[in-house]
């Protein structure tokens, strides 16, 4: 009997803040254990969100039972890093890199980084609330104005993953029943 082990890549993308993280943590453990049992062995991370931190901590915990898991940090900052910063990052990840096509991304760098993560993944695990709107921003010397017309980065990433026909697990929706 020949056993073929499939290798799958999973990315995590979510809002900066999560509701009820104490309820989300066991759900992420359950989902990632199930994904690992189906062949997931490489996990891609961005930064800047509470969801990213929770997922990184989960995969780090699971490495005790599954030491071959790879955590990869896809940087959206610092195209070139010195050996000290690289050594620091490699305390938490097995690999880190800055996608070369992001060099001239400007303000859309995080959007494009998320697209790179989605493109490289078989499964995308999101924490995406479709009714979330980015916080109000000051417009120069004007008063705060609502940003209802602006989509969140997570919303744009979610739409991109759907457009690319990626398998999506949305933990926000699942937590709402």
Image (cartoon, grey):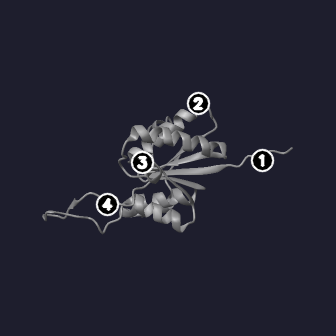
Task: Tell me if residue 168 comes above or below residue 89 in the rendering.
Answer: below
| The quarter of the displayed image where residue 85 is located | top left
Asked if marks 1 and 2 touch (Cβ < 8 Å), the reply is no
Q: Going from the N terminus, do you reach mark 1 or mark 2 first?
A: 1
Q: Going from the N terminus, do you reach mark 1 or mark 3 first?
A: 1
The quadrant of the picture occupied by the N terminus is top right
Residue 25 percent location from the top left of the image: 46, 39
Front disc: 2 or 4: 4
Q: Is mark 1 on a helix, strand or loop?
A: loop
Residue 135 percent location from the top left of the image: 26, 57
Mark 3 residue crowding within 10 angstroms, few (<14) / some (14–19) / many (20+): some
Asked if marks 2 and 4 touch (Cβ < 8 Å), the reply is no
Residue 133 bears which disc, if any? 4
- Residue under circle 3? 47
- Residue under circle 1? 4
Mark 2 residue crowding within 10 angstroms, few (<14) / some (14–19) / many (20+): few
> Residue at 50% across / 38% down in the picture?
58
Residue 111 percent location from the top left of the image: 42, 61
Q: Going from the N terminus, do you reach mark 4 or mark 1 first?
A: 1
Residue 106 percent location from the top left of the image: 37, 63
């Amino acid at each position: 009997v020949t056993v073929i082990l499939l290798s799958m890549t999973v990315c995590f993308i979510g809002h900066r803040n999560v509701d009820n993280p104490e309820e989300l943590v066991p759900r992420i453990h359950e989902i990632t254990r199930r994904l690992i049992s189906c062949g997931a062995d490489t996990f891609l991370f961005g930064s800047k969100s509470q969801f990213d931190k929770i997922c990184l901590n989960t995969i780090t915990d699971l490495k005790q039972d599954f030491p071959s898991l790879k955590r990869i940090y896809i940087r959206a900052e610092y195209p070139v890093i010195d050996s000290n910063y690289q050594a620091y990052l490699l305390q938490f990840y097995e690999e880190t890199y800055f996608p070369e096509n992001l060099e001239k991304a400007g303000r859309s760098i995080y959007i494009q980084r998320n697209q790179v993560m989605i493109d490289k993944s078989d499964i995308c695990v999101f924490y995406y609330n479709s009714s979330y709107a980015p916080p109000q921003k000051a417009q120069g010397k004007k008063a705060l104005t609502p940003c209802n017309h602006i989509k969140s980065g997570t919303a744009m990433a979610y739409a991109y993953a759907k457009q690319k026909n990626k398998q999506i697990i949305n933990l926000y929706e699942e937590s709402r029943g």
